[in-house]
């Protein structure tokens, strides 16, 4: 075996759901595997998206050979347009993955900074010094890949997001035979990187086709009511099954939501979605049909405020108003952090009179990720020399590591890594350098780089404590107060109901400025400091709060 070392740098996805991104390094070149985003938590006010920290890639841009997409979900591909701003590189993936990613890249004006290169099931190709073999796996978006990287330090197998679905909607199963052949052909797998999302869930993940059976039941149970099904726009197998159930019940289908209509159009063009044109109607036509004659397939399963489902629930949608004639099926689980948004939309739908069916009360969703028995099966099939769990929160990684030890992998060869770690694989084994590269959160608010940790900290403080502005006009020569102080507050107290408190606050500031003038303080900064300090002391003593205080001093 060649002793040339191979490095793996983890930039995201190890310790959180989302931001999946790692770099494989061979002969001084870098292949980026996935480039995902994460949705913001409630403690990230005003943040639209969270990206991996691209510092390492920016600093080594000339060494980046390309990006490979395991599949087209946002947590694996949503950061591409932002990366291309700094690192123009080709992107490799299945034709569907590239088609779904293309729209976002084009929208961001970055299409001229990349080349989209399709790869196919079972194909083995060289990307610079990277010898890659693409293995079909089943997931909740079609045409996902696991990948074998044949490197100087041995074969590295990355599962991507996968499940072992024995009856997939499109018949494209996880190719266990090819994985077994690769293990045998390469003389064993040196390192396995495997999806940990469902490592806490016992048993097997049900087949996607079970949702189709539930959907057919729904259409039978509500023959006279309009069915509105909310799902991920990328879950084309789910869309196919909903459409088949609707057609079987004699209904027409309308698609709603920009990403849903875009993805359905692309999938039909590629032959991945069998939806006859004569059975599809425009959303503007829905009102002309009786409720039992149509089905609407829409976005909004995560409760996004401006999504089609949320607008319908709020009676603000241009074409559809939800009523007691509707049954709304939310065919997805809430992404961590979105639970409150989903709950709010479900409440609004009930207030509108609709019946709501979701994963909590019916089998209308199954996961696209392998559960414990499937994860153990892959571990046992591959029997890797070293194992690193990836894709999940820290607890998921720990549980997956435990599964690896249970199937017989030596404990010292099971490594739980985190974002920022660099793993080096060579002839002698594996070495891990902890937190070796920057891998913190990069926040997006409007445009990339707009929000730093300091701004986020200020926003949290404003959200929790509020803002107080104190405005005074002073004599430039003597420092004496001419007019004011005036106090404007947002989020500290409600001014119309706190006249007495505000008058006391003004008096405290007035007294402090008079004291400063008596001491001969006439410079601008000293007066500002006195105004801030005196008002801050008063607020803390009277209300035990610490709002942001902005003193505005006008000199005349």
Image (spheres, rainbow, N blue to C red):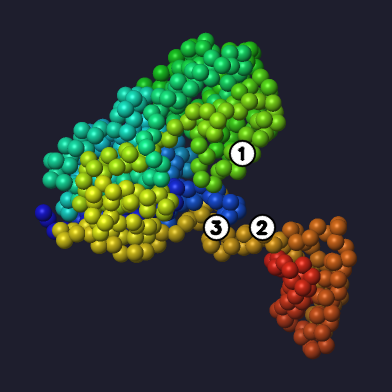
Q: Residue 178 lies in what quarter of the image?
A: top left
User: Sequence order check: which comes first, mark 1 or mark 2?
Assistant: 1
Instruction: Identify residue for label 2.
Output: 463
Q: Name the quadrant of the C terminus.
A: bottom right
The reply, left or right, for residue 40 in relation to residue 418 is right
As displayed, is residue 292 above or below residue 118?
Answer: above
Q: How far, Cα to Cα, is label 1 from label 3?
A: 28 Å
User: What is the x, y in percent for residue 310?
Assistant: 62, 34
Q: Which mark is residue 451?
A: 3
- The answer to whether mark 1 and mark 2 are in CB contact below 8 A is no
Which numbered mark, 1 or 3, is in the foreground of this view?
1
The residue at 52%/28% (across/down) is 362
As helix, strand or loop, the secondary structure at mark 2 comes to helix
How far is the residue under mark 1 from the one under mark 2?
A: 22 Å
Q: Is residue 62 visible?
A: no
Helix, strand or loop under label 1: helix
Marked residue nearer the N-terminal end (2 or 3):
3
Reply above or below: 445 against 364: below
- x 75%, y 79%: residue: 530
Res. 225 in view: yes
Please determine whether, in this image, residue 436 is positioned above or below residue 173. below
The CA distance from mark 2 to mark 3 is 16 Å
Identify the element where label 3 is drawn: strand
Q: Residue at x 37, y 50 (%)?
A: 399
Counting from the top left corner in percent of width and height, residue 41 is at 55, 51
* Residue carrying label 1: 343
Q: Quadrant of residue 312?
A: top right
């Amino acid at each position: 075996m060649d002793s040339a070392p191979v490095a793996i740098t983890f930039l995201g996805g190890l310790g959180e759901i989302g931001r999946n991104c790692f770099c494989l390094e061979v002969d001084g070149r870098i292949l980026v595997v996935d480039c995902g985003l994460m949705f913001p938590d409630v403690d990230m006010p005003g943040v639209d998206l969270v990206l991996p920290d691209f510092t390492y890639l920016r600093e080594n841009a000339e060494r980046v050979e390309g990006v490979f997409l395991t599949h087209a979900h946002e947590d694996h591909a949503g950061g591409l347009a932002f990366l291309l701003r700094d690192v123009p590189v080709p992107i490799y993936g299945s034709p569907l993955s590239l088609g779904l990613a293309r729209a976002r890249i084009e929208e961001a004006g970055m299409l001229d900074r990349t080349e989209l290169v399709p790869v196919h099931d079972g194909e083995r190709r060289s990307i610079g010094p990277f010898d890659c073999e693409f293995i079909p796996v089943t997931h909740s978006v079609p045409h996902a890949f696991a990948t074998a990287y044949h490197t100087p330090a041995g074969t590295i197998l990355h599962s991507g997001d996968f499940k072992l679905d024995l009856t997939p909607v499109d018949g494209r199963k996880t190719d266990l035979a090819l994985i077994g052949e690769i293990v045998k052909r390469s003389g064993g797998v040196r390192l396995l990187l495997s999806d940990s999302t469902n490592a806490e869930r016992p048993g097997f993940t049900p087949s996607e086709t079970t949702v189709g059976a539930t959907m057919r039941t729904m259409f039978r149970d509500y023959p006279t009511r309009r069915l509105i099904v909310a799902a991920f726009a990328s879950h084309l197998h789910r869309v196919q099954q909903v459409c088949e159930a609707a057609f079987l019940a004699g209904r027409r289908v309308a698609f709603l939501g920009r990403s849903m209509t875009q993805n359905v159009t692309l999938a039909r063009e590629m032959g991945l979605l069998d939806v006859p044109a004569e059975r599809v109607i425009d959303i503007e036509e829905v009102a002309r049909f009786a409720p039992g004659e149509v089905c609407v397939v829409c976005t909004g399963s995560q409760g996004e405020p401006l999504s089609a489902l949320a607008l319908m629930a709020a009676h603000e949608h241009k074409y559809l108003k939800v009523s007691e004639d509707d049954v709304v099926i939310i065919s997805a689980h809430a992404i961590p952090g979105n639970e409150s948004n989903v709950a709010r939309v479900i409440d609004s739908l009930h207030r509108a009179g609709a019946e709501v069916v979701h994963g909590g009360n019916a089998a209308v969703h199954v996961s696209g990720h392998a559960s414990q028995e499937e994860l153990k099966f892959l571990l046992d099939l591959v029997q890797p020399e070293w194992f690193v769990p990836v894709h999940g929160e820290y607890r998921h990684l720990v549980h997956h590591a435990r599964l690896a030890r249970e199937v017989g992998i030596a404990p010292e060869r099971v490594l739980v890594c985190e974002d920022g770690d660099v793993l080096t694989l060579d002839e002698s084994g594996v070495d891990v350098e902890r937190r070796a590269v920057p891998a913190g959160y990069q926040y997006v608010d409007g445009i990339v780089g707009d929000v730093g940790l300091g701004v986020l900290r200020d926003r949290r403080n404003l959200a929790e404590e509020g803002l107080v502005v104190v405005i005074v006009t002073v004599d430039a020569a003597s420092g004496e107060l001419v007019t004011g102080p005036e106090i404007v507050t947002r989020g500290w107290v409600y001014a119309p109901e706190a006249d007495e408190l505000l008058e006391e606050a003004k008096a405290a500031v007035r007294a402090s400025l008079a004291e400063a003038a008596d001491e001969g303080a006439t410079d601008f900064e000293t007066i500002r400091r006195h105004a801030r300090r005196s008002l801050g002391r008063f607020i803390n003593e009277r209300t035990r709060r610490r709002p942001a205080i902005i003193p505005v001093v006008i000199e005349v």
